[in-house]
Image: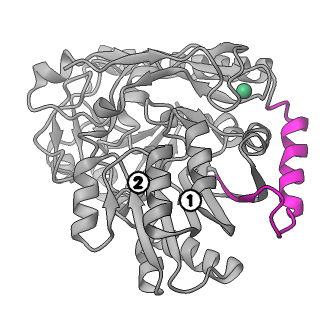
Amino acid sequence: MSAQVFHRTTCRLCDSPNVELVVKLKPIPLSENYCNDAEAGLSADRYPVDLYMCADCGHVHQLDVIDSKSLWDSYTYYSGDAKGMPEHFREVAQKIIKTYAPPVGSLIIDIGSNDGSLLRPFKDSGYSVLGIDPASEIARMATESGIETYPELMTLPLASKIRNERGPASVVCMFNAFAHADNMGEIADSIRTMLADDGIFVFEAQYLLDIIDRVLIATIFHEHMSHHSVKALTIFFERHGLELLSVERVPIQHGSLVGVVQLKGGRRKPDASVQQLLDLEAVRKLDKIETLKQFGATIEQLRERTTNLASEWKRKGLSVAGYGAARSGPTLISQLGLTGIIEYIVDDHPQKVGKFSSGDGIPILPTSELCKRMPAYTVILAWVHAAKIIESNQEYLDKGGHFVALCPETRIIGAAGNVQV
Ligand SMILES: [Zn+2]
């Protein structure tokens, strides 16, 4: 089944028509569509993920938008599955409760709530919680597990309905999805509609500066439509009657921002963090087209190195596997010239083992196969967990295997540590 693609012609945050193509990338298949046979995987359609910059507000984003049904219906990424995420969400919830003291029993909403991992600690602390997530199967399971979740996209009519039925929210969160939505203007208006006068909106999203500095190309796929910067967000919130109070850089996903927002003119004063990051972004020229073009050149260099490496493996007849049927897998394979190189991917996700990757038709096998089959090289596709994967697969390395880490630079890891490329 083919997805519908719509190409935006205006900035997702400020509606300006002055958007310029800054990084041309390879089209990739939808990352979460695992197929039942290799042929279906190989024939899966590919869609663009090129990056554009808004000349007016500096926002960097993809303008090719996949219809939400194709993108979310079969989505199988569970926050609770991701290593460290439940702990991270518990800490976030505790920090919000401690710092902003929402009244106990008041309503906390999470947009893009996934399996309810962020809402659960709020519920355990006595708050009324409501999740909103268009991935219908995940939403159903979250509701069944006690976190009521509407299987819907965040829209203004839904926001009005929630406000009328449940009253104002003391906290609205958007942790999994702040980079995932095309209708950002409507989402901002929905947040404003749902928030109590002294309520706060808290979001987490990957930070453009980290994406560039650490060459996080694995994070560029169809679900991640926006790559946020503080400058563009400040302008965006202002336009929608909201105000950024603080921004904190956190190590989640190799570099994210946690931002806190209130209704414009609210009782809290913005702290120094907002201006500090605005100053840093100005020094780093984060809103300049040349900066993004340089990022594109870096990706090309990385692709050249990986492609050379892959040709050498092929020439020597070496076997190559992938580790982790992660969302970032198809992106890394396509952007770094690894198409046709990886024979199988090992992963223990019950909904992925026995299936085939979309785009390349690569079979997914359980991780126990790694030491049985002993591929000469295993490319780490679950890039976020590279260190953990290397650490927990010492047996494979001791038996002569090698891991290949791809970003921010290509590294080959053997039993004795890094091996010269
Ligand atoms: Zn803009």
SS at mark 1 in the image: helix
SS at mark 2 in the image: helix
Which residues lie in the magenta part?
A: 257-286
203 left or right of 65 in image: right
Image position, residue 55 (x, y; %):
78, 19
Local crowd size for mark 1, using a 10 Å CA cut-off: few (<14), some (14–19), many (≥20)? many
Which quarter of the picture shows residue 326?
Answer: top left
Q: Nearer the viewer, residue 166 or 331?
A: 166
Check residue 390 in the rendering and tell me which mark sits there, or answer none: 2
Check residue 194 in the rendering and tell me which mark sits there, or answer none: 1
Image position, residue 351 (x, y; %):
17, 49
Amino acid type indicated by mark 1:
Met
Amino acid type indicated by mark 2:
Ile
Q: Is residue 278 magenta?
A: yes
Can residue 346 be seen here? The reply is: yes
Which residue is at a point 65% across and 24% down the rendered structure image?
A: 11
Residue 35 vs 155, above or below: the answer is above
Which residue is at a point 80% across and 23% down the rendered structure image?
A: 56
Which residue is at a point 8% across and 27% down the rendered structure image?
A: 37
Local crowd size for mark 2, using a 10 Å CA cut-off: few (<14), some (14–19), many (≥20)? many
Q: Quadrant of ligand 1?
A: top right
